[in-house]
């Protein structure tokens, strides 16, 4: 039985296969419409979500399976003090696979130690978000035709941004990637990401504060939200939340073929008039998320079209 807790739980070859399967699902959805008939996905969301939970549920429904779960821990017995481990043991009796989001880093790993069905980490605190990374990789692959040889700028909250941490880990295994980390000093990429992932491989990266200075060299700009829910101090959040706002004027310095990604939700960091720029890919990213999650569910349940 396989779980997906960290993106590196998948080999590079397995990620390539998931991308290929997602591409085939996009081209031939009818082939996949019943492959999970009789199977159930449970979504256990101890933290809010729109895209991840609903795309997992849509993915299982489009595979012919069924879904159950909760979107708010307050409506589950976690509110009475039940542990994550007990919750997952119980839900393992009802479902064939579990997608779980939790505010505590490591909670999906703990769940996987006791689960009797595959666990998918749908985001754990400020740590990792591997299925967003699969979504991002599919989007980059569809937009650029490959996952190699480009410069990517990560902009915003790189400290608590779990989507950033997982995508850096995934791209560190690709060829010819240059990383530009754009953030205020308070929200810099964590040392553990540099020390455990980038430095041992000798991968090139720079850390800068100015989005404008970095813009001309980027092939992909990965914008992120400054996350209110990760701050202990509201004054710090208010001071930092509008550090970066991408608008058409700032984009005028970007390459014509640059691609703009954002895991969403956005708050203020991309103005709505950027949405019509052909370089904006964040709503395509949303659509891609369902297809790559369909591919992942099939892989973990070991079902084939
Ligand atoms: N990208 C993402 O994780 O969005 P949600 O928080 O809406 O699931």
Image (cartoon, rainbow, N blue to C red):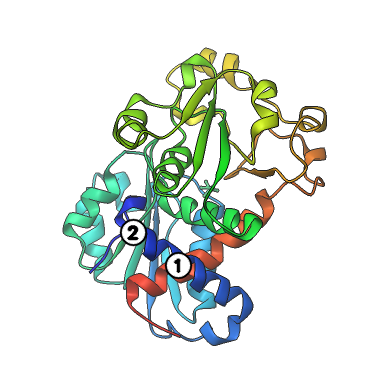
Helix, strand or loop status at disc 1: helix
- Seen at 49% across and 79% down, the residue is 63
* Mark 1–mark 2 CB contact (< 8 Å): yes
Residue 282 or residue 46, whichever sits in front: 282
Residue 135 in sight from this viewpoint:
yes
Residue 262 is situated, as x and y percent measured from the top left of the image, at 61, 43
How packed mark 2 is, by other alpha carbons closer than 10 Å (few <14, some 14-19, many 20 or more), is: some
- Along the horizontal axis of the image, is 163 left or right of 201? right
Helix, strand or loop status at disc 2: loop
Residue 229 or residue 218, whichever sits in front: 218
The image shows residue 233, relative to residue 269, as above or below, that is: above
Residue matched to label 1: 18
- The quadrant of the image that shows the N terminus is bottom left
Residue 141 is situated, as x and y percent measured from the top left of the image, at 58, 58
Circle nearer the N terminus (1, 2): 2
How packed mark 1 is, by other alpha carbons closer than 10 Å (few <14, some 14-19, many 20 or more), is: many
The image shows residue 283, relative to residue 202, as above or below, that is: below
The quadrant holding residue 68 is: bottom left
Residue matched to label 2: 10
């Amino acid at each position: 039985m396989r779980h997906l807790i960290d993106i590196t739980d998948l080999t590079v070859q397995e990620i390539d296969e998931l991308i290929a399967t997602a591409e085939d699902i996009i081209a031939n959805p009818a082939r996949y419409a019943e492959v999970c008939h009789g199977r159930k996905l449970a979504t256990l969301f101890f933290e809010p979500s729109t895209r991840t939970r609903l795309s997992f549920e849509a993915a299982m429904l489009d595979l012919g399976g069924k879904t159950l779960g909760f979107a708010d821990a307050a409506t589950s017995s976690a509110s009475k003090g039940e542990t994550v481990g007990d919750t997952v043991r119980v839900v393992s009796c009802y479902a064939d696979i579990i997608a779980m989001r939790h505010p505590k880093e490591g909670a999906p790993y703990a769940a996987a130690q006791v689960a009797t069905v595959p666990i998918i980490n749908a985001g754990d605190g400020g740590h990792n978000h591997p299925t967003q990374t699969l979504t991002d990789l599919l989007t980059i692959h569809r937009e650029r035709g490959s996952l190699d040889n480009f410069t990517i700028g990560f902009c915003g909250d790189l400290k608590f941004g779990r989507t950033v941490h997982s995508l850096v880990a995934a791209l560190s295994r690709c060829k010819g990637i240059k990383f530009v980390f754009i953030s205020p000093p308070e929200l810099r990429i964590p040392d553990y990401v540099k020390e455990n992932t980038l430095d041992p491989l000798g991968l090139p990266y720079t850390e800068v504060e100015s989005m404008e200075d970095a813009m001309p060299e980027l092939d992909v700009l990965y914008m992120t939200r400054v996350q209110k829910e990760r701050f202990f101090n509201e004054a710090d959040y208010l001071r930092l939340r509008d550090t970066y706002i991408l608008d058409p004027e700032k984009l005028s310095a970007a390459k014509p073929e640059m691609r703009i990604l954002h895991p969403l939700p956005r708050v203020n960091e991309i103005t709505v008039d950027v949405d019509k720029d052909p370089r904006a890919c964040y709503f395509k990213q949303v659509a891609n998320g369902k297809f790559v999650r369909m591919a992942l569910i099939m892989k973990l349940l070991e079902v084939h079209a």
